[in-house]
Amino acid sequence: MNRAHAPRVLSIAGTDPTGGAGMHADLKAISAMGGYGMAVVTALVAQNTCGVRSVHVPPVSFLREQLDAVSDDVVIDAVKIGMLADADIIATVRGWLDNVRPPLVVLDPVMVATSGDRLLDASAEGALRELCRVADLITPNLPELAVLAETAEAADWHQAVSQARQVSRDLGTTVLLKGGHLTGADAPDALVDARPDPAVPGGYAEAHAPRVATTCTHGTGCTISSAMATRIAAGDTWPQALERVKAWLTRALTAAADLEVGQGHGPVDHFVDLRGCIR
Ligand SMILES: Nc1ncnc2c1ncn2[C@@H]1O[C@H](COP(=O)(O)OP(=O)(O)O)[C@@H](O)[C@H]1O
Ligand SMILES: Cc1ncc(COP(=O)(O)O)c(N)n1
């Protein structure tokens, strides 16, 4: 598919005033991957690279107004969903999705931040699991995958792949399995689809990159899911999208420390490929 216009990608997510995670990371990743980024805010989060201080959730009626303001005006090519905070927000987003039916829905089932702070009420995990059924692609990290698989966190890549297959089968969606929480020289990711008619040929496509020795991993999950939404909407095959996004994210992680942002887990450099090009 060769579009005349950049893919119009809507992020539905929470905020990070330090610009490294949530809707800010989403907008940077969408832009860096060649898309036109839009954003609807689910929750305002007072956080930085060291952790979450507090969360403010506006009324869900205002969330629905934001969503309708976008979809009443703009043709949306892909939606990326991040932090949803509680069951009311999940129900509101679900109601809007049922009405608008965007062609591509990528869901990052955000539960806990890198800092260990909760970004989803524990009582809303079941509702988030149900929302996965309407997504084309979900991008859980290993602790989130374990919650979705209703089992203990995978200790190695082999266990993680079998959990991803189970979740794909149970929830009828493709899983982007991320090896960020494992250790070892390699940082594998894979598209896993257990269904008979998978979006991924053969039901499995792996991408490899060296594990980058950095503590700057704030927002990597938000970043990879938005980038995947953008590249798939741009017409890449799903395995092509993963190869491209993985290579770019590895460059962004390698350059991250040079940004010198914050004292905790710093953000990645989404615009690493632009440095040196701006005159
Ligand atoms: N140190 C690292 N080196 C290379 N890639 C990494 C590193 N840490 C995370 N990643 C990549 O970042 C993405 C997000 O992974 P992960 O950390 O598992 O998710 P989350 O940010 O949701 O916890 C994945 O593509 C993963 O492979
Ligand atoms: C608003 C918001 N959404 C998501 C994350 C998770 O970030 P990470 O990708 O580091 O797990 C975050 N810290 N804040």
Image (cartoon, rainbow, N blue to C red):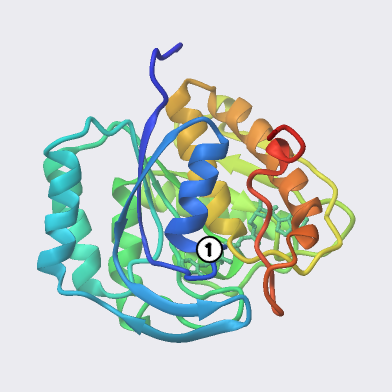
x 62%, y 26%: residue:
240
SS for callout 1: loop
Which residue sits at x=75%, y=46%?
Answer: 250
Asked if 187 appears above or below 104 in the picture, the reply is below
Indicate whether 13 appears above or below 192.
below
- Examine the image and state in which quarter residue 57 appears: bottom left
Image location (x, y in percent) of residue 127: 28, 68
223, 111: nearer the viewer: 223
Q: Quadrant of the C terminus?
A: top right
Residue 193 visible somewhere in the drawing: no
Establish if 59 lies above or below 208: below
Kindly identify which residue carries mark 1.
Answer: 19
Is residue 74 shown left or right of residue 225?
left
Callout 1 crowding tier (Cα within 10 Å): few <14, some 14–19, many ≥20 = many
**Quadrant location of ligand 1?**
bottom right
Farthest residue toward the right? 185
Residue 13 place in picture, x, y as percent: 37, 60
Of residue 76 and residue 142, the one placed in the foreground of this image is 76
Location of residue 215 (image quadrant): bottom right
The x, y position of residue 226, in whole percent, is 49, 45
Residue at x 73%, y 65% (from the top left corner): 216
Q: Amino acid at mark 1?
A: Gly
How many discs appear?
Answer: 1
Does the rendering let one see residue 183? Answer: yes
